[in-house]
Amino acid sequence: MEDILKQVQLGKMNIAEAKEKLATYEDLGFAKVDHHRKKRQGFPETIFGEGKTAEQITAIIASIQANGDAILVTRISKEKAVEVRKTHPELIYNEVAELLHTEIAHKKTASTNFIAVLCAGTSDLKVAEEAAVTAEAFGCEVRRFYDVGVAGLHRLLDNIEEIQQATVSITVAGMEGALPSVVGGLVSHPIIAVPTSVGYGANFSGLSALLTMLNSCASGISVVNIDNGYGAAYNAALIHRLAEQKEEE
Amino acid sequence: MEDILKQVQLGKMNIAEAKEKLATYEDLGFAKVDHHRKKRQGFPETIFGEGKTAEQITAIIASIQANGDAILVTRISKEKAVEVRKTHPELIYNEVAELLHTEIAHKKTASTNFIAVLCAGTSDLKVAEEAAVTAEAFGCEVRRFYDVGVAGLHRLLDNIEEIQQATVSITVAGMEGALPSVVGGLVSHPIIAVPTSVGYGANFSGLSALLTMLNSCASGISVVNIDNGYGAAYNAALIHRLAEQKEEE
Amino acid sequence: MEDILKQVQLGKMNIAEAKEKLATYEDLGFAKVDHHRKKRQGFPETIFGEGKTAEQITAIIASIQANGDAILVTRISKEKAVEVRKTHPELIYNEVAELLHTEIAHKKTASTNFIAVLCAGTSDLKVAEEAAVTAEAFGCEVRRFYDVGVAGLHRLLDNIEEIQQATVSITVAGMEGALPSVVGGLVSHPIIAVPTSVGYGANFSGLSALLTMLNSCASGISVVNIDNGYGAAYNAALIHRLAEQKEEE
Amino acid sequence: MEDILKQVQLGKMNIAEAKEKLATYEDLGFAKVDHHRKKRQGFPETIFGEGKTAEQITAIIASIQANGDAILVTRISKEKAVEVRKTHPELIYNEVAELLHTEIAHKKTASTNFIAVLCAGTSDLKVAEEAAVTAEAFGCEVRRFYDVGVAGLHRLLDNIEEIQQATVSITVAGMEGALPSVVGGLVSHPIIAVPTSVGYGANFSGLSALLTMLNSCASGISVVNIDNGYGAAYNAALIHRLAEQKEEE
Amino acid sequence: MEDILKQVQLGKMNIAEAKEKLATYEDLGFAKVDHHRKKRQGFPETIFGEGKTAEQITAIIASIQANGDAILVTRISKEKAVEVRKTHPELIYNEVAELLHTEIAHKKTASTNFIAVLCAGTSDLKVAEEAAVTAEAFGCEVRRFYDVGVAGLHRLLDNIEEIQQATVSITVAGMEGALPSVVGGLVSHPIIAVPTSVGYGANFSGLSALLTMLNSCASGISVVNIDNGYGAAYNAALIHRLAEQKEEE
Amino acid sequence: MEDILKQVQLGKMNIAEAKEKLATYEDLGFAKVDHHRKKRQGFPETIFGEGKTAEQITAIIASIQANGDAILVTRISKEKAVEVRKTHPELIYNEVAELLHTEIAHKKTASTNFIAVLCAGTSDLKVAEEAAVTAEAFGCEVRRFYDVGVAGLHRLLDNIEEIQQATVSITVAGMEGALPSVVGGLVSHPIIAVPTSVGYGANFSGLSALLTMLNSCASGISVVNIDNGYGAAYNAALIHRLAEQKEEE
Amino acid sequence: MEDILKQVQLGKMNIAEAKEKLATYEDLGFAKVDHHRKKRQGFPETIFGEGKTAEQITAIIASIQANGDAILVTRISKEKAVEVRKTHPELIYNEVAELLHTEIAHKKTASTNFIAVLCAGTSDLKVAEEAAVTAEAFGCEVRRFYDVGVAGLHRLLDNIEEIQQATVSITVAGMEGALPSVVGGLVSHPIIAVPTSVGYGANFSGLSALLTMLNSCASGISVVNIDNGYGAAYNAALIHRLAEQKEEE
Amino acid sequence: MEDILKQVQLGKMNIAEAKEKLATYEDLGFAKVDHHRKKRQGFPETIFGEGKTAEQITAIIASIQANGDAILVTRISKEKAVEVRKTHPELIYNEVAELLHTEIAHKKTASTNFIAVLCAGTSDLKVAEEAAVTAEAFGCEVRRFYDVGVAGLHRLLDNIEEIQQATVSITVAGMEGALPSVVGGLVSHPIIAVPTSVGYGANFSGLSALLTMLNSCASGISVVNIDNGYGAAYNAALIHRLAEQKEEE
């Protein structure tokens, strides 16, 4: 802020420009798209699809594309996606993860870094894929380790050596949510734990897995909201970038 | 009931006797001791020490001993135990488990059956010992596997082959309570899971571990109340007896 | 593990074999079927039908049958079952319990042991039948005692002498869930208590019955998740097997 | 109100009198004692002792006695009671129930009606006695049936015929709180159920028993707050009075 | 029980008869109808309609009518009622209260006693009517005082003198559920409070009103489950009968 | 009341008139419309549309209009509104806010006072509009500041100087509900905070935002029920009127 | 902000001054006192005493007094207050409300406006006094209406005409918290409702009263945190000021 | 594992050695210290002090020091620390953070990276310091930004440019816990959010802040358990190391 104030004082910048510099969003009426954040972080604009009409989503996409950016729509049902793709046939719809996005160009770098995405059971797949594809859309290399829940421990142990090579793990689990605790004891990188609402009875829509992960006796685990695969990927991508920058130097 | 009715009808039993047959307790005024149950099950009378005075406990002990039975007092503080032992110096006090009991005569049978008592961390020791000593007081062979929580998986895997030989496991864990889920995937006998109130923050006095255990994705796990080491041992002893009877035949 | 290590050291086993020995599952892509567990326990493979498509279920069934094993699918709706039975007409669908399974061949043994399945009211029938049929599919003899809730105590007392002969009881109850407490005071075998989500108002989807069962003042009761008839049967079958083995010797 | 308005209109009552007629309390500064209610109902004034100093209690007692009424103080600790009795040595302190009251003159009527007070275990005694003595202070005949919890059903069944003769039952239970459900199926008079905070673990300070009683499958049960023995007695006395009036006619 | 034992001893009763005497229910397969209770209490058999098919309800009705008793079905939807009435056109369906019942013959007695049914708002009508019609089906005189919630206090005060004449009040309220507290301070008969699930937001499906009623600072209030109009009427009828018996003498 | 009593005493008012004076509602059978309150407060009659049929709503509208008053119906679905407007085409339906109301005549006063309505995200729009339009229907000037959530702080800071000029703010937020805390630190007028049920996972239908607002470390914030835009507007209008009265003098 | 930018541009303000303008707090190391807010609002600085040592409180007081401002310390125990008054004997300690403050000079204005502070029972006194004295310290006229709970409605109705004259009411209630609902139906000014943690059993530390107030069917009620008398007074003073400004003009 | 198997096969490693390789802990009887993990991660051994005696802590310290490692004891009270320091006077006790640790040698590297530790209020200091000192003990550079809660936004904005330079932020907040949401919108590095149990009333021991953080509308935030400053630091250190490794290359 001091820089801007100085330039205003020196007459190098007029007030309209100064205000513009601080403007960080475009107001589309029903949504204020935050372009500034995008520039700082290199991640594509993300549109939360739930509760928006196909028309609204289509309009926001047009606005972002006009800015030259990639598209990522989360939590968009098949019906809405079909509608939106009439206008934007170039976008790809991932039905399992309920994501609509610009084709993901896999990086060609020398880096061997990757984010590990684990899930405990097949019913956690939706959330795990939301995390995995989001991380890929954010330019990260991802490797998937699915159905490795603790009740069949050998499935996890068979893959643990590869998982240990990741820069960061996203660990998705429903029911009792014990997977992050076990993984936390076996790896030495940060773990983003994602409780899912998968389960029944005293699961209470994911509360059981959420509490398990918050109370984990293993270190190096932090937690995001129930079913929040997107949030986990966002966190993981921020962490992963630190290692990537290292490699790229 | 039909038998008794028949004998009354045939005049082989008078009404007072018939009523006596159905009487299953002795009324001490402040407590009705259930002698009948004891006889059916071969387990010593158990006195829940919490909320009873040393005087009341002493009186109940006398009554049970008059019946020729062994003594087991649970949840009795050191102060009360010291007081009670002035009258009953023959009883042994286990400070960790807060149990007061008749000396336990380890059986000399050919059976190699045992109950495995596992706990996740050192802070679960009190509950684990309550379970272990109670099971011993009920005449069961017990083997302890302590501090084998999932965050350091090798500590569990090192002992798993021995644990697999047990007739039944009592698995005690606080914090996130993930231990039974992992053990459940590695053994093929029934597991009694005991959540403990050990933890802090979103542990909510054991609720976290309780929900974890109820929602376990592993099969063969049933759950008792938070910190209820005694209840777990009672269940385990009932199950263990089935295997013992087999051995003894 | 030591055995395998020794054989490898002695050259009696090569590394591929050693790894195979530890392999306990078959990876079908969308599911990793745990064949190892099955062999250890003699129970048929179980498929949790909820959240799987008819196609997925059909594929898993084929894989298990190729292995020569019996089939048990839980929580499968009538619609899906009709679809699956087009390919597998040999399977039987139990509409009340929502189970699809290989025809159950009732054992012809001298054993008179049985598992007692009790339920409090007619609305608990679905869960009780899930438990009863599962136990039968696991090779156990089952006797049903339905609609014996505590509000009409004579219905329970009329049957109690037969119930007392069981090796283990599965006690299913919704609303206030008091049945296990009463049964617990009348029998001397282990009781698996199953709270159901039957009720309204302050029942809170089974929470009321769940807390009742966890806090039971009767001993010998352990609890599984709300509506988890399958889990109760799995536990009961593990316990029952101990008595069966005794008989068979 | 119309009567008063008419008398004012006719000049038979002046405005000060009219206002007085509607005044139903005496203002002691720190408390407004409701004399009107007392007159309507024939029950002695009740002072809730918790959170009041011995001085405040002493002052209120003086005010009530000046009105010629009997005294009942609930939830008053031994320390405060000793202090108050220095000024009011005529009052009797019941240490178990934590009640301080005017000596209770048992009625000499031909009526054989009574209120049955049941409790499940010895640790529910405090609440049960608060209920029993309060009902006696309200002029009701009371019979106690203590330690008749459902885990030892015969203790209840042995007394059930006498309990069935009551006009109304107060049924006190902690832990899982199943007693009212069983009693509700055996008697045909109204039952006031009182959950107590007795228990541990997933009892959650009486929540478990409270939910059990609210969800009871037996009819004829209504519930008061956790540990609210006084409230139960108040309700029971209101009901009992209906039967008494019948007898007295 | 002693009487029966004596008669058996004296040979006045054979064992089959003795067992029959204790039989209190008829087993229809999917339901065990409790005829004994009915005889003791003079209330018509009640069928809980929720979760039963029209066929099941029709069958139970036939069984009860064969016994010469009146019919009351609660929580039966319009669709099911239409179906049942094809076989039983003599039954009356109350759409608001979702009750199906034998025509209610209003008593012709000299008694002026009545049960007051109050509700706070128009959205509590369904529960209030379930209570009112049930009480009428149980032979009680009922007077309705609807939409008298505390936010418009004059609506209550205008009717309070008539309400005070009741033998017992059923007070139904959703949202914050304050009505029983205010009524409790104005009448001197017992109040059965019924929380309803009416409300939104932090109402949590009736929890708010339930807690309010349990914590009421007014005396003479006991509580039944959320939306349990039937239960409230059952309680009220038991209490009301005491006053009626008085009148009839 | 004293005034009325005096006039009765002096014969200036007869009893019927005195009773009429206290009558504050009109009884339409299924609803008691409170006309008195309306006169005191100058706010149009409000009809809570949820749970009422189109017919009922139409009838109440007729009754209010007969009284010469404006109409405001809240929480009325499009289907019902279409139905009602067949009879009352003069009413305006606001689809976003689900309000049906008399055309709002914006005041022509010199006052520059206004109520600020803020919301955090586009999904809070429905609740924010319910608040804004209700306040307008109550005769208040309203300015909207939408999509100013704390995650993009500049959107709020850009508008804060105008918001500071308001007499009172209504601040609507879902998810974590942090907006009122930030606004509370930046303005010096009262804030009515409205949590919305917008969110997922551990949001628990608005509980998260509700707790946040109740625990706000900023002063000057009070809270209404989840999604209660109407209630917030009612509160704000009462406060706003104080400033308006000042201006008008 | 634009003004400051303009003045910087015009050279009328240098950058240091511009930054100073935005500085709103003084950093005392362990606390950052917000002087700016104070100036805007005319309320004395408030120190939250809980969790601060007497030394820390003494130091903050010195700093505020150096600024010429009045002192208000909330939630300060008697022990700490005695300690602080050794240095600041000019401060007054209110033991009931646990407030320490500069002597309050009651305004001498022609205004007859006042804030009404109501509480339901004597045990709510602490919170009510915290609210009343805080409001007085903020320069508001306060009138107290204590022990006017709804169970003895006449106590409230006797005072309602005076309460109706207030600009705003603070309504404090524990247990079931029904008082604001009743008051809300009788007055036409805004009500700040304060739930207290007074109660027992299913009160759950004030949760019962909190939910009641949030769900109130009366309009014009907003709610602050449990026991938050200070927050209620802050809100009320902001509202009251609007009326005062009117009078003063 | 394959490597070890191969070496065993080739006779290069005997079985005892192979087993040793997998041993990752030292068994001290009451604790199994995990040396393996330590070596992998370069963090000093951490001892959770709560629930351990001074003797136990002293013994573990000796064992770790024998291994040549640094010491960090968390949640150790002053009393215990004094006792332990009799044997280990070289350790430093941090009273605010309740940490006992080896003197921390601040690194002398060219790196300008740092972890930002923010807290909302002075009462969050204990948790913030536990995080800050733990991170320092793990070799990280830390900068503290305390008392920057959202109610006084300028305190945060004054420091935001420096905070933006951090590799990762630990953001500690109690009460409503809104700080991470605001910071999340202003920085582009990962944020570890720590809810504290600071607050009262509807804070429910930190639940309010926990839910706020889990539901944050800002991205890049993950959450650890309530009051878990140590866990936050562990996570942050894992992330920070990635950036450090980059710098060091």
Image (cartoon, coloured by chain):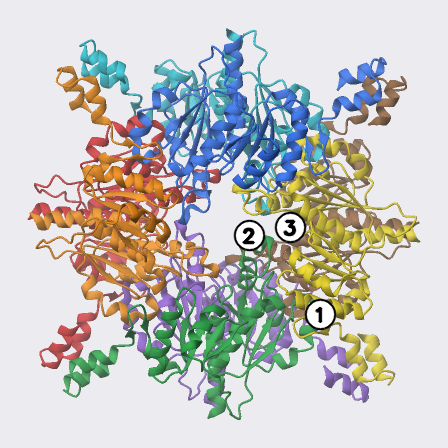
Chain colours: A yellow, B cyan, C blue, D red, E orange, F green, G purple, H brown
Q: Which residue is mark 3?
A: A227
- G205 to the left or right of A70: left
Which marked residue is nearer to the observer: mark 1 or mark 3?
A: 1
Other-residue count near label 3 (Cα within 10 Å), few / some / many at <14 / 14–19 / ≥20: many
Q: Using the rendered image, report if marks 1 and 2 lie on a common chain.
A: no
Query: Label 1 sits on what residue type?
Result: Ala
- G66 to the left or right of H63: left
Query: Label 2 sits on what residue type?
Result: Ser
Q: Residue at x 91, y 54 (%)?
A: H110
Residue A59 image label: 1
1 or 3: tag closer to the N-terminus: 1
Which marked residue is nearer to the observer: mark 1 or mark 2?
A: 1
Subunit under mark 1: A
Asked if residue E244 can be seen in this view, the reply is yes
Vertical comparison of D155 with A18: above or below: above
Circle 3: element type:
loop
Circle 1: element type:
helix
Query: Label 3 sits on what residue type?
Result: Asp
Q: Which residue is mark 2?
A: H205
Label 1, label 3: how far apart the Cα atoms are: 27 Å
Q: Residue at x 18, y 39 (%)?
A: E68
Position of residue F98 measured from the top left corner of the image (x, y, whole percent): 50, 71
Asked if residue B95 can be seen in this view, the reply is no
Q: Quadrant of the N terminus of chain C?
A: top right
Other-residue count near label 2 (Cα within 10 Å), few / some / many at <14 / 14–19 / ≥20: many
Label 1, label 2: how far apart the Cα atoms are: 44 Å
Other-residue count near label 1 (Cα within 10 Å), few / some / many at <14 / 14–19 / ≥20: some
Vertical comparison of B231 with A108: above or below: above
Front residue of B31 and E87: E87
Q: Using the rendered image, report if marks 1 and 3 lie on a common chain.
A: yes
